[in-house]
Image (spheres, rainbow, N blue to C red):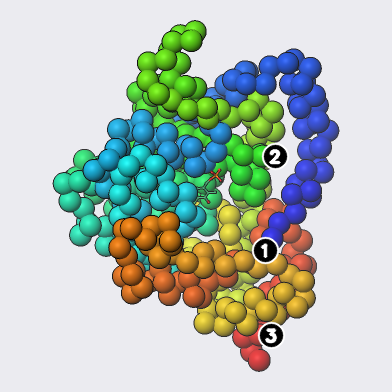
Amino acid sequence: MLDLKAQYVPIKEEIKSAVKDIIESGRFILGENVESFENEMARYHNLSHAVGLASGTDALHLSLKALGITSGDEVITTPFTFIASAEVIAYVGATPVFVDIDSKTLNIDVSKIEEKINEKTKAIIVVHLFGLPADMTVIMKLAEKYNLKIIEDCAQSIGASYKGAHVGSLGDCGCYSFYPSKNLGAYGDGGMMVTDSIELHDRVKLLRNHGTVGPYQHDFIGFNSRLDEIHAAILRIKLRLIDQYNQNRQNIAKLYTSLLGNLLQCPAELDDRTHVYHQYTIRTPLRDKIHDALKTKSIASVVYYPLPLHLQGAFRDLGYKLGDLPESEAASDEVLSIPIYPELEPEKAEYIARTIVEVVNS
Ligand SMILES: *Cc1c(COP(=O)(O)O)cnc(C)c1O
């Protein structure tokens, strides 16, 4: 689905030198690279704070904890996402409440949120799926009306903007994953929370390091969830290139849509937001045929996501059944993500698209 080597080659010398400097300095945990990268990410978002963490899952988990979400609380999210978006709600003892998706954007259907809000509802985890921002205006209005915390799951959407502002800067906090295949990927696991709230920043910073308030003084139970210096140094180099990477993805997306747009459902492009195409996901009843045809030509394609979260065994105790969230279930049957990454050659993208066109026209 992607070629990480192709991204490495042009920045190889810079990365090697940055990694070598860290090894020679002997400072591997919470040093100057993590701090600088936090400052650079905060600035990129026009926010005051960022905290480097061990993964995107931890960013979501520690944000919920820092916001005081706990057992007995309910947190609304989408069932059409990677499991981490909802798993973290269970980590803090709260209950995930799934709201169905919009069939075109594949993001949470904001017109269906309000009916699920009750006195137990404390937060919404908004996922900007595949790189397309969700309808934040409606979500922020609901947040104000019902006093809800808004956590943006930006794991797939770094650099995407909504009405001119980067995602991650719209809710109470934004959570990032630097898993190697994400638009901004480290060479291992990594994550970050960005926020304008000093309280939230302080709390997550303590949580990531065992609740350490002074040398071997621990005010509360925390975690070991620190971003490594080596990853921070690599990410600093790539952050300078992220807008270019995303632009390349957008160019490929444009090519795909020009060739496929009349034949099947292509990703939604909306006037008030930008899509950064973490995935280019098509939707068609011919999904399985297309997947097979691509496979025959050794072209990768993946179904994100084949089973919505409300039907996963991990959430069986919540009592959802088939038919409860029909748009998510229908999407799972019809979606297919095809290769997209900044270094994908247009000729190759065209070849992939032509293969799909052949299936549709056959
Ligand atoms: C990747 C991802 C996560 C989890 O990030 P990790 O760094 O793998 O823990 C969370 N939410 C979404 C939507 C993701 O795509």
Q: Secondary structure at mark 3?
A: helix
Q: Between marks 3 and 1, how big is the CA–CA gap?
A: 17 Å
Residue at figure coordinates x 63%, y 18% from the top left: 32
Quarter of the C terminus within the rendering: bottom right
Given residues 220 and 6, the one toward you in this image is: 220
- Place of residue 121 in the rendered image (x, y in percent of width and height, measured from the top left): 23, 47
Location of residue 282 in the rendering, given as x and y in whole percent from the top left corner:
55, 71
Note whether residue 234 is visible: yes
Residue at figure coordinates x 59%, y 20% from the top left: 30
- Residue hosting label 3: 358
| Mark 1 Cα-neighbour bin, 10 Å: few <14, some 14–19, many ≥20 | many
Amino acid under disc 1: Pro
**Residue where numbered disc 2 is placed:** 187
| Left-right relation of 106 to 299 | left
Give x and y (percent) for residue 46.
46, 32
Say if mark 2 contacts mark 3, CB within 8 Å.
no
The residue beneath circle 1 is: 339
Point 70% across, 39% down: residue = 187
